[in-house]
Amino acid sequence: MLDKIYTFIIIGAIAIIGNWVGYDVSPIVALPGMLIIVAITVCGFAIEKLLPIKLPVVIWVSFLALLVTSPIFPGNETIVKATSQINFMALATPILAYAGLSFGKDLKEFKQLGWRIVVISLVVYTGTFLLATLVAEIGFRVTGKFH
């Protein structure tokens, strides 16, 4: 667990630098929001380990994030204001880089899967993209945005 915490801290530091360089948000301004994001992530991992209910950790992290930013949580406005200083793309870039690096360690096993995995991956990614686009389009039409 300690290795994961260090990894989250490193990703957070890289995201703060990316936020500063790419979106001109001072690291001092972004630091509280990043600390909150890292804390929620660490708590989500801890809950996943402690509870007997086996759900993917992304569900626990998402649930915690929704909880602490909901109106029922004391201080939610402060949390939302602090985390809004972090641009999503500045946060996604180091996470995707980490995912790419961790994929590299499994490259040997990936090669053993053969060409079929490439076809399956393309179909899954295409389906995910099209379904996400459909959901967004329905959402925009229901809310009246982007007529």
Image: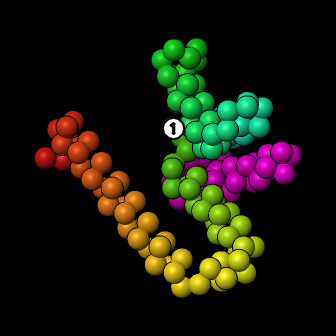
From the image, give the main secondary structure of the stretch colored magenta: helix
Image quadrant of residue 41? top right
| Residue 97 is a magenta residue | no
Q: 136 left or right of 93?
A: left
Give the camera-side residue of 9 and 102. 102
Quarter placement of the N terminus: top right
Q: Residues within 10 Å of mark 1 (few under 14, many from 20)?
A: few
**Percent x, y of residue 77:** 51, 22
Give the image quarter of residue 94.
Answer: bottom right
Residue displayed at 30% across by 48% down:
135
The correct choice, above or below, for 64 with respect to 130 in the image is above
Residue shown at the point (44%, 66%) measured from the top left: 124
Say whether residue 12 is visible: yes
Give the percent coordinates (x, y) of residue 104.
Answer: 70, 75
User: Over which residues does the magenta segment extend?
Assistant: 1-30
Residue 15: in magenta span: yes
Q: Nearer the viewer, residue 19 or 46?
A: 46
Is 20 situated left or right of 145 in this image? right
Disc 1 residue type? Ser
Query: In x, y percent, where is residue 71?
Result: 48, 17
The residue where tag 1 is placed is: 84
- Among all residues in the image, which is located at the extreme right? 2
Q: On the picture, is 67 further left or further right than 105? A: left
